[in-house]
Amino acid sequence: MAVKVNVEECIGCGACVASCPFGALVMQADKASITEACTACGACVEICPVSAITRELEAKTVQIDVTDYKNVWVFIEQVEGQAKNVAHELLGEGRKLADAMGQKLAGVLIGDSVQPLAQEVFASGADIVYVVEGPELKNYSTDGYTTVFTDLIQTYKPAVVLIGATNDGRDLGPRVACRVGTGLTADCTNLGIDAQTGLVAWTRPAFGGNIMATILCPDHRPQMGTVRPKVFKRPEQDFSRSGQLVQVANKVKVQDIRTRLIEVVRVCTVACNLEEAEIIVSGGRGMGKPENFTLIEELANVLGGAVGASRAVVDAGWKPQPHQVGQTGKTVGPKIYFACGISGAIQHMAGMSSSDIVIAINKDADAPIFKAADYGIVGDVLEVLPALIEEFKKIKQAC
């Protein structure tokens, strides 16, 4: 895309300068001028009262017929033959999008001997499951999975593609989007249908989480986005459902994959598997010092939960980054979330607001975390936690 100003028609009103969200328009000799900061978003095109600004396709850009693209796809990320929860969460939300668009929902399974997972995908709402299997695809690889997914999109032409914003999903999504010539909205926190255009409205945090931006993809297909785990609830499964199973031949060869998995080293145990945890015990700077995190770990161990941390704790080096909950960490949605010594900065609460029950412990009765809490304890966390641990141990022994 390229945005151009017809200086002969420009009346120098300055409306475009005020409308540009990137400060890419300036006034020169009473005429609008576009700088290198332009992203071709089109805001200035719509605001110009005399239509002196136009947005044109670059010569190398291939125009497509968007009506050729149908259905909503969800990438079913799996590890060792088990589908990740985020895949089912996206199937639930994808079902809503597909129904609103009057189209079908499909799941995409890539791996080795993964066809048995198709029934789970149908149970979570899919009408179609595309399966590509091969020993070369047993473990995720950038080359292999990108080739397979790109080929599927070019063959079957989906209108929408949803991918979990996991480590693998964040690697796969932009590579596939680039190959098929479309855009990708990363780390979405909400999905919907734009009432005026019928396009998918992708909502994601912007400017450090201070605003929420809604993004549309009108000119290219498929409309693609990655969505954080735990943003949406996993749907109730109906195993009486069935659908169309499409087996696609694997065209990837061993020599096509430039990397080889030598060994899997598990450096993070269940204690920091935040996306899958039903109980999370998180600590903030209110814990005082890193040694006091043994209380967080002990409570999590007693409850069979995971250990979380605020950004301040991770930045201070008290806990490694995989434990971080928040806007720049992981988005979680456990059944119970303990916020211990966490004040409740907006970035942290954005990452745990989907929790079913929030229990906050803080000595500051005015801490923002209490506004998000279902239960609050005002007190010294170093005194409250030992008492909770003791009581939960008694309950556990009684059971």
Image (cartoon, helix red, strand yellow):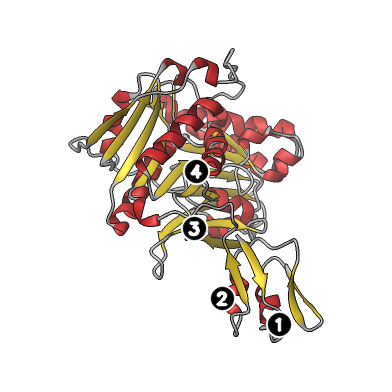
Q: Residue 136 placed where, x, y %?
A: 46, 17
Of the two numbered discs 4 and 3 on the same chain, state the one appearing first in sequence.
Answer: 4
Q: Amino acid at mark 3?
A: Cys
Of the two numbered discs 3 and 1 on the same chain, state the one appearing first in sequence.
Answer: 1
Q: Amino acid at mark 4?
A: Val
In what quadrant of the picture does the C terminus appear?
A: top left
Residue for badge 1: 14
Q: Residue 196 placed where, x, y %?
A: 40, 70
Of the two numbered discs 1 and 2 on the same chain, state the one appearing first in sequence.
Answer: 1
Q: Tell me whether circle 1 and circle 4 mark residues in contact (CB < 8 Å).
A: no
At 17% from the left edge and 36% from the top edge, which residue is drawn?
A: 240
Q: Tell me whether circle 3 and circle 1 mark residues in contact (CB < 8 Å).
A: no
At 38% from the left edge and 64% from the top edge, which residue is drawn?
A: 198
Of the two numbered discs 1 and 4 on the same chain, state the one appearing first in sequence.
Answer: 1
Determine which of the numbered discs, if any, sits on residue 168 in the image. Answer: none
Q: Amino acid at mark 2?
A: Glu
In the image, taking residue 285 as reference, residue 100 lies left or right, namely left
Determine which of the numbered discs, if any, sits on residue 46 in the image. Answer: 2
Q: Residues within 10 Å of mark 1 (few under 14, many from 20)?
A: some
- 259 and 152: which is toward the camera: 152
Q: CA distance from mark 3 to mark 2?
A: 16 Å
Q: CA distance from mark 4 to mark 3?
A: 14 Å
Residue for badge 3: 217
Q: Amino acid at mark 1?
A: Gly
